[in-house]
Amino acid sequence: MKQLLCLILGFAAAFLSALPARADVPAPETSAPSVLLMDQDSGRILYARQETDRRPLASVTKVMTLLLTFEALDSGRISLDDTVTVSEHAAGMGGSQVFLEPMETQSVETLIKCIVISSANDACVAMAEHLGGTESAFVEQMNKKAGELGMKDTHFVNSCGLDAKDHYSSALDIALMSRELTTKHPEIFEYTKIWTEDMTHHTRKGDSSFTLNSTNKLLKQYPCATGLKTGSTSQAGFCLSATASKDDVHLIAVIMAAADSKARIADAIHLFDWGFGICRLLCDANTDSLSAIPVTGGTDSFLPVRYRNEFRYLDTSGSSEELSKSVDLPDSIAAPVKKGDPVGRAAYYLAGEKVGEVEIIASASVEEETFRDVLIRLLHRLFFDAGGRAAADATADGPS
């Protein structure tokens, strides 16, 4: 009986996960077994089917390698101009490659282009070794990062995505790492939009030119496409983590185990068309001014406040109504207050339903009034106010 109940619940979960964001809109037509569509900004899943199934992910693995690369760039550990020397191990990678030679030197930026544009396994391993010392040490960092991102159905064995036992991910996990890369490091799009670019081999035999050609055919077939990473092997089938933007809506589509390259492109287009068709981005820039809050027991009498950030909401309800906002601030606030402290909030509603909120924060600090502050204020009133009144009286009693 217990096994039957678990089976029923499993079927129910799979059915519910495949439901579209709106019940009145048919699901997008896709052929791949595992697909997912996510709003990049919020991480909201708009559509998914078998999104937690563990499957080989081929070169989509490189999304994680790129994420760790850009984190290293942001932290200052490496720079785009750093020189990387290609090892025998990196140069010996099979599959998709740009035929780097042992002891060849390339800049970090060139290797990024080789990874992103041509999905080069040799460039990917060279970067992994540059960052981790060895590829195996770098793979440990990849798995650690996967855990931090909540990627529960992912395990990496290599940095480039060649078929290997226990090397797998899921459509949901691929979306999670793709979102982390694109939201935290939007400069990745400077590379993912490149269709072709000429490069130079720097080897002991001399320099020679070669051309990078994008593996992402979606860039030419879908006007809104911006990236991100393709992948295909005999075990993985044809995979894709695709990104596209339209009317300030940014979507991530993941396709796993498609039958061929055309099928994965078609699935991505169907997901994007469906997503852009049901999505409406509602924004409030929060540029309206807010009244200062009276302060009790502070060195200043009033506290200036502001919204922490703008508000953005992706509406898929089909409603034609606009956002309404309700501001909640206290009548007064006790010192001390630090700049940036939350002091209230603005709630946003659509068709009477709350859809989110933004904190209202202090835009300055107000220190607590000390005994010395009180004494100085009293003396100020005693002498200056009294002196002012005396001068006024003398003027009033003088000759007219």
Image (tube, rainbow, N blue to C red):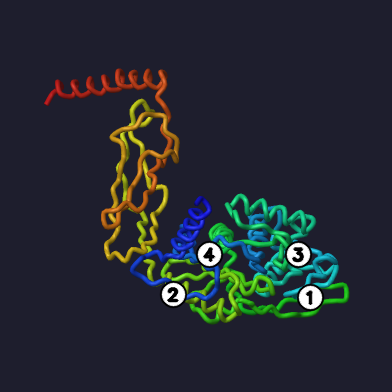
- Residue 125 is labelled as 3
Label 3 packing within 10 angstroms: few (<14), some (14-19), many (20+): many
Q: Kindly identify the amino acid type of the residue bearing the numbered disc 3.
A: Val
* Label 4 residue SS: loop
Cα distance in 3D space between marks 4 and 3:
30 Å
Q: Kindly identify the amino acid type of the residue bearing the numbered disc 4.
A: Gln
Q: Is residue 343 above or below residue 264?
A: above
Chain-order first, disc 4 or disc 1:
4
What percent of the width, then of the height, locates residue 124? 72, 66
Q: Nearer the viewer, residue 68 or 395?
A: 68
Asked whether residue 32 appears in the rendered view, the answer is yes
Identify which residue is drawn at 43% across, 66% down.
249
Q: Which numbered disc, 3 or 2, marks the residue closer to the eye?
A: 2
Q: Is residue 341 left or right of residue 325?
A: right
Q: Which residue is mark 2?
A: 273
Chain-order first, disc 4 or disc 3:
4
Q: Which numbered disc, 4 or 1, marks the residue closer to the eye?
A: 4
Cα distance in 3D space between marks 3 and 2:
35 Å
- Contact? badges 2 and 4 (CB < 8 Å): no
Task: Give the image quarter of residue 378.
Answer: top left
Q: Which residue is mark 1?
A: 99
Q: Is residue 40 left or right of residue 174?
A: left
Cα distance in 3D space between marks 1 and 2:
37 Å
- Contact? badges 3 and 2 (CB < 8 Å): no
Q: Which numbered disc, 2 or 4, marks the residue closer to the eye?
A: 4
Cα distance in 3D space between marks 1 and 3:
12 Å
Q: Nearer the viewer, residue 394 or 376?
A: 376
Q: Which residue is mark 4?
A: 50
